[in-house]
Image: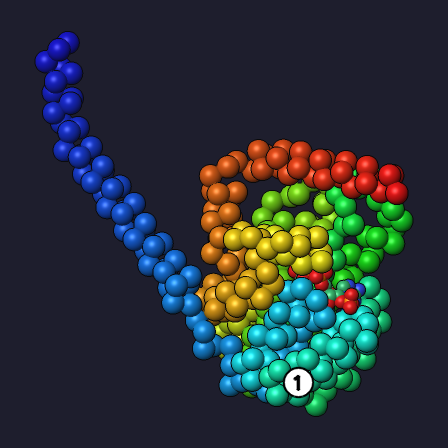
Amino acid sequence: MQPCLETVLRRTEAPLYWIGAATAAWVSLWSFYRLLSGFRIWVLGNGQIVSTKLGKWAVVTGATDGIGKAFAEELARRGFAVVLISRSQEKLDDVSKSIESRFSVETRTIAVDFEAADIYPKIEAGLAALEVGVLVNNVGISYPFPEFFLNINDLDKFVTKMINVNITSVCQMSRLVLPKMLDRSKGVILNISSASALYPVPLLSIYSATKAFVDFFTQGLNAEYKSKGIIIQSVLPFFVATKMSKIRKPTLDKPTPERYVASAIRTVGLQSQTSGYFPHAVLRWITTSVIPVNLIMKLAMKLNMAQRARYLKKHKQR
Ligand SMILES: NC(=O)c1ccc[n+]([C@@H]2O[C@H](COP(=O)([O-])OP(=O)(O)OC[C@H]3O[C@@H](n4cnc5c(N)ncnc54)[C@H](OP(=O)(O)O)[C@@H]3O)[C@@H](O)[C@H]2O)c1
């Protein structure tokens, strides 16, 4: 028995050695490649690609606050004339004046409510004569607080509203600007999805699902048009300190919209799907590659239940 085992071990020793060596070499090469591409994306970045060589105008939806406003300002800083689209004309006028005086660029405003489905002829007319180089599909809404699907106030209207703002806007705005970008064989479309598209988020189920739509739509569209010179990127932030997230104090992992956008814009042309900001890329890696998805969903449910309880308590006390 013993000599037989020894023979087997002797015969398998060499193949096992080579399998081990090949695995170690593959893991080292892969890690080195990941390190290099991480360095390329998060340290060197791609600062130049988003420039007015793409076209004179940039269009930003949801441009009067938060991430959208930060994109509008960053694009103006890069010399783009900017079309600002949001609901309130008064807020649009304020942002427009501030951008024109700070960056000496032209601006135009289009006041529409993306909750409605019949606004696109008005937007089309507003963009008709413009050479649009960049479109940022940023407008989006979430829940006032995490809630069970059937408990959502005015659920019927809420569903339509969220689909129109978060999904229809992205498809319709892309429909309006892509044809002219294709004629010129250049253009960039940035679609702001969310980290909630990476896994289902209980108590924010409709929001999370709309953002998964945005991410899938973007990846599909990018595959269709990248060979035609158009970059279509899906952006998946974790928390950013804005009105929507109700985070007032920015931290390293919850940056200001300006800090987030300054980082995200440098990933254009390097990643078709991006977290946009290095600490968010780390969070993404932990929540998708280290922790199993069912655990993430349990954790999200627990956190959202706690947030829901806090919200309900606060609003009952009033
Ligand atoms: N903040 C985060 O932590 C976070 C994380 C992941 C993803 N995101 C995504 O990032 C995007 C921007 O979020 P944000 O946090 O910057 O939001 P925000 O601070 O609430 O700003 C939203 C912007 O959209 C406009 N808007 C809202 N509803 C509209 C409507 N029905 N029609 C037209 N304009 C409308 C608002 O302007 P008016 O009210 O003047 O119309 C405002 O300019 C969203 O798509 C969001 O899902 C945000």
Residue nearest the viewer, comparing 218 with 92: 92
- The residue wearing badge 1 is 100
Give the left or right position of residue 107, taking residue 224 as reference: right
Measured from the top left, where is residue 284 in percent x and y? 51, 48
- Of 85 and 225, nearer the camera is 85
Dot 1, how many residues are within 10 Å of its Cα: few (below 14), some (14-19), or many (20+)? Answer: some
> How far across and down, in percent of the image, does residue 39 sit?
36, 60
At mark 1, the secondary structure is helix
Above-or-below relation of 124 to 205: below
User: Percent position (x, y) of residue 139?
Assistant: 71, 65
As drawn, 272 above or below 180: above
Which residue corresponds to the image point at 58% horizontal and 66% vertical from the top-left? 258
Residue 28 x %, y %: 27, 47
The image's colour scheme reads: rainbow
Q: Is residue 100 among what the camera can see?
A: yes
> Image quarter for residue 47?
bottom left
Amino acid at dot 1: Glu
Q: Is residue 226 above or below residue 13?
A: below
Give the residue at the far top of this rendering: 1
Number of marks in the image?
1
Q: Judge: label 1 CB < 8 Å from ligand 1.
A: no
Q: Quadrant of the C terminus?
A: top right
Q: Residue at (62%, 69%) from the top-left corner?
A: 70
State the image quarter where residue 98 is shown: bottom right
Q: If the picture is divided into quarters, which one holds ligand 1? A: bottom right
Residue 150 in sight here: no
Q: Work out which quarter of the rendered image holds the N terminus and state it.
A: top left
User: Residue at position x 15%, y 29% from top?
Assistant: 13
Relative to 223, is 54 above or below?
A: below
Task: Find residue 9 and report its image quarter.
Answer: top left
Say which of 203 and 308 sits in front: 308
